[in-house]
Image (cartoon, coloured by chain):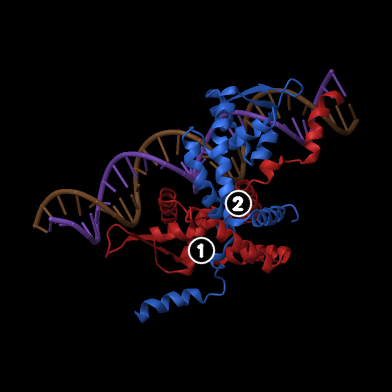
Chain colours: A blue, B red, C purple, D brown
Amino acid sequence: MTEQSSAKSKLQQDALLPRNTRRSLPIALLRAREAVMSHFRPMLAEHEMTEQQWRVIRILAEQEVVDASEMADKAFILAPSLTRIIRSLEERGIITKHKDENDGRRVLLRITPAGMAIINEVSPESRLIYDRLEKRFGRDKIEQLLDMLDEVATFNETQ
Amino acid sequence: MTEQSSAKSKLQQDALLPRNTRRSLPIALLRAREAVMSHFRPMLAEHEMTEQQWRVIRILAEQEVVDASEMADKAFILAPSLTRIIRSLEERGIITKHKDENDGRRVLLRITPAGMAIINEVSPESRLIYDRLEKRFGRDKIEQLLDMLDEVATFNETQ
DNA sequence: GCGATATCATTAACATGTTAAATATATAAG
DNA sequence: CTTATATATTTAACATGTTAATGATATCGC
């Protein structure tokens, strides 16, 4: 018994040990995100949509034409992932994809009526979940959280 | 040229990112997380470690023996991912894996000296980055953020 | 105009995320 | 003791994350 615990504490007294994982910011961000997303995923799954695919068509519902780079920025999806997502959504008739005539490198994306139909079916339930979240924590607290997260997001810009 | 861009650039002037996306909690959590992680990944890559693999061995540096279920909980990694990570780390001699003699279903994990060597090499630089983060935002603010994130993480429990 | 350089999108290769199903072991009910 | 049920881990299949390399088009400098 004492033998067993002595080895453990020997390891733990090492000064080089990393910070306790319980208060790790990356994991805390992951947990919070998962807590929110777990409410959305089942509803999206009913429409054979992933969370990332939903982000893409939601942005196209707000803005008629978006090129791939802008989409990657707004939806926070890396280019290689976006390429695959665009291919899948186009094959399923949810979005269209055309070369930009003024810049042959760019790809212009638009949502189709089929895509808008999904938006219209999912949006009400999506709002309901956000409302529940706001009711649970209060709008002020969520705004405050969003502000702090925005601030943390600048950590990579300011060295 | 000016005609073409006028309608859209007016919209864009209000906010480079549309309010809906920019003030979306899931994406804000993602952005914040990425801002933090982008500082760690290059350093982990030097040791051929992914972020998730680092979480696993860091937990094993704190606690001598951890079974797979407990690891999944603490590192916030789903079981199928953990299975693959354990296989990779074991093959590389960074951790060991044994059946629990009292419960044949369970798998017990331990870190090896080679694993501890990685911990000792990475930890100082890791602490440096966290210190920079703390200096940038203040310890109180980060503690406050962690508290709020913990609270959001309970959103899935309390319906 | 032409060549060097930059930018945008895609592909490749491997790791992880996600859900469902399969497997192995443990525990409870009878 | 045996069957049914529950739990822990693994496997499978597909989607996305991540970095590096490639191909295509634009743009800059001369």
Q: Nearer the viewer, residue B78 or A17?
A: B78
Mark 1 neighbour class, 10 Å CA radius: few under 14, some 14 to 19, many 20 or more: many
Residue C2 location, x and y as percent? 82, 22
Residue A98 location, x and y as percent? 66, 21
Query: SS at mark 1?
Result: helix
Residue at the image point whose x is 67% and y is 56% from the top: A140
Give the vertical position of B117 relative to B77 (above or below): below
Q: Nearer the viewer, residue A44 or B143?
A: A44
Mark 2 neighbour class, 10 Å CA radius: few under 14, some 14 to 19, many 20 or more: some
Give the vertical position of C26 relative to A114 (above or below): below
Give the vertical position of B60 relative to C11 (above or below): below
Tell if the residue under mark 1 belongs to the same chain as the one under mark 2: no
Instruction: Looking at this view, name the residue that lies furthest to the front.
Output: A135
Residue at the image point whose x is 56% and y is 65% from the top: A23
Q: What's the mark number on residue A134?
A: 2
Instruction: Looking at this view, name the residue that lies furthest to the bottom.
Output: A2
Quarter-wise, where is residue C19 in the image? top left
Q: CA distance from mark 1 to mark 2?
A: 35 Å
Residue at the image point whose x is 37% and y is 81% from the top: A2
Query: SS at mark 2?
Result: helix
Q: Nearer the viewer, residue B92 or A48?
A: A48
The quarter of the picture where the C terminus of chain A appears is bottom right
Quarter-wise, where is residue B120 in the image? bottom right
Identify residue for label 1: B58
Residue B131 location, x and y as percent? 67, 66
Residues tagged 1 and 2 counted as in contact (Cβ below 8 A): no
